[in-house]
Amino acid sequence: MSTYKKLPDAEFEIMKIVWANDPPITTHLIMEQLGTSKGWKAQTIITLMLRLVERGFLRTEKIGRDRVYFPLIAKEDYTQFETRNFLKQYHDNSLLGLVSTLYGDKTLSEKETEELRQWLRDQGE
């Protein structure tokens, strides 16, 4: 896995839309699915998408009069990067520390406990 840089929240919102749709992606599509709810203007979305191109998350082409974008990084790869970074930064790479924090004083159900056990068994194979 490559080393990525953490995306600012606004750029991550754009990438979530990119990953949820089949390429190529247009600024119009982003505006339809995100811009209106966020109150962003078209120029804001264009600027954010150009930043994503500069960061290596998107590739752009001009097709006719339109500029289209293609993802260069898979959602799964970026999510794995972010999760590992979070685990390292906040839990000293301790999965047990993460689970303990998530559940705190709550008790895991029997089903959740069995799912966790099964996941751990699968990891050992």
Image: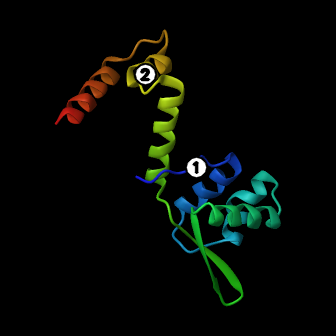
Identify which residue is drawn at 72% across, 60% down: 48
Compared across the picture, whether 80 is left or right of 111 comes to: right
Query: Which residue was labeled with disc 1?
Result: 5
The residue sitting at 80% across, 67% down in the picture is 42
Q: Quadrant of residue 69?
A: bottom right
Between 120 and 111, the residue placed more toward the observer is 120
Residue 112 visible in rendering:
yes
Is residue 32 in sight in this rendering?
no
* Amino acid marked by disc 1: Lys
Q: Nearer the viewer, residue 25 or 48?
A: 48
- The residue where tag 2 is placed is 99
Compared with residue 77, is residue 94 higher up or lower down, i.e. above or below? above
> Quick one: which residue is furthest to the top in this view?
105
- The tag earlier along the polypeptide, 1 or 2, is 1
Residue 24 sits above or below residue 76 on the image? below
Question: Alpha carbon of mark 1 to alpha carbon of mark 2: how far?
Answer: 25 Å
Q: Position of residue 10 (x, y in %)?
A: 70, 50
Say which element carries label 2: helix
Q: Is residue 97 above or below residue 47?
A: above
| Total tally of numbered discs in the picture | 2
Q: Nearer the viewer, residue 113 or 60?
A: 60
In the figure, is residue 94 to the left or right of 31?
A: left
Residue type for callout 2: Val
